[in-house]
Image: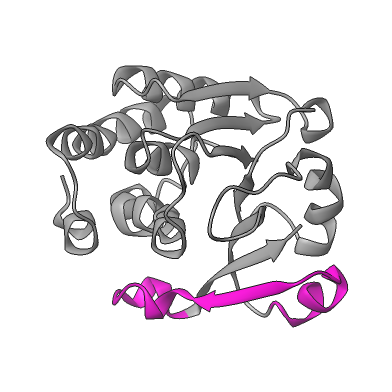
Amino acid sequence: MDNIIKKYFKLSDQQQSQMDMLGKLYPEWNEKINVISRKDIDNLYVNHILHSLAIARFITPMKDTAILDMGTGGGFPGIPLAIMWPECRFHLIDRIGKKIKVASDIASNIGLSNVTFQHGDIGECREKYDFVVSRAVMRLDELVPLIRKNISPKSNNAIPNGLICLKGGDLASELNKTKLPTLVEPLDTYFDEPFFDTKKLVYVQI
């Protein structure tokens, strides 16, 4: 496994093994189905896995916390988070079937038992979750109305239920239009690597 993960997180032997396997399985799948930019696959651990795990620096959820990964693509941030939090339940949804196929196959190959998958639109997902997570899927002010119905009114964690997004760039416009309590965390306070200099975590309480 790329030592970059161990630099920031204490992992069990099983978690280390699962993280190692991601470094083999994603490049293999990417040769067949392009789920990560071809020029970016060499940066898998920093730009995709560690980036996903920024959410694990922001919150440590209670056992049985339910998390929806909306627009998961090839499984980010859901799969790295499911490795980190084996006692939480994850549901990964994406409109592109071949990407869900990749994520599902990788989860199966590394032995993740806390993840389910759905090929479809967020409008087709009616279940309730403690948190919705996403990674640069769409503008916050467009995303919040779509996932509001999926946030459970009953909160069990230290942080109230809501949306946790990984974003980049200037967020002022979309934050202003969101009209809900928000918190923005610059990721360069979590990680030293230059990739994170312009990246942010945004939490929206719903």
Image quarter where the C terminus lies is bottom right
Please name the residue shown 63% across and 44% down the image.
Answer: 130
Please name the residue shown 38% across and 24% down the image.
Answer: 106
Residue range corresponding to the magenta coloring: 171-197
Q: Which of 176 and 98 is in front in this view?
A: 176
> Compared with residue 62, is residue 30 higher up or lower down, i.e. above or below?
above
Please name the residue shown 17% across and 63% down the image.
Answer: 7
Q: Is residue 182 visible?
A: yes
Q: Is residue 76 visible?
A: no
Does the magenta run of residues contain 64? no
Q: Which of 75 and 154 is in front in this view?
A: 154
Tell me where residue 165 appears, x and y as whole percent.
61, 59
Tell me where residue 149 appears, x and y as whole percent.
83, 41
Tell me where residue 170 appears, x and y as whole percent.
67, 80
Does the magenta run of residues contain 189? yes
> What colouring method underlies this structural image?
one colour
> Compared with residue 24, is residue 9 higher up or lower down, i.e. above or below?
below
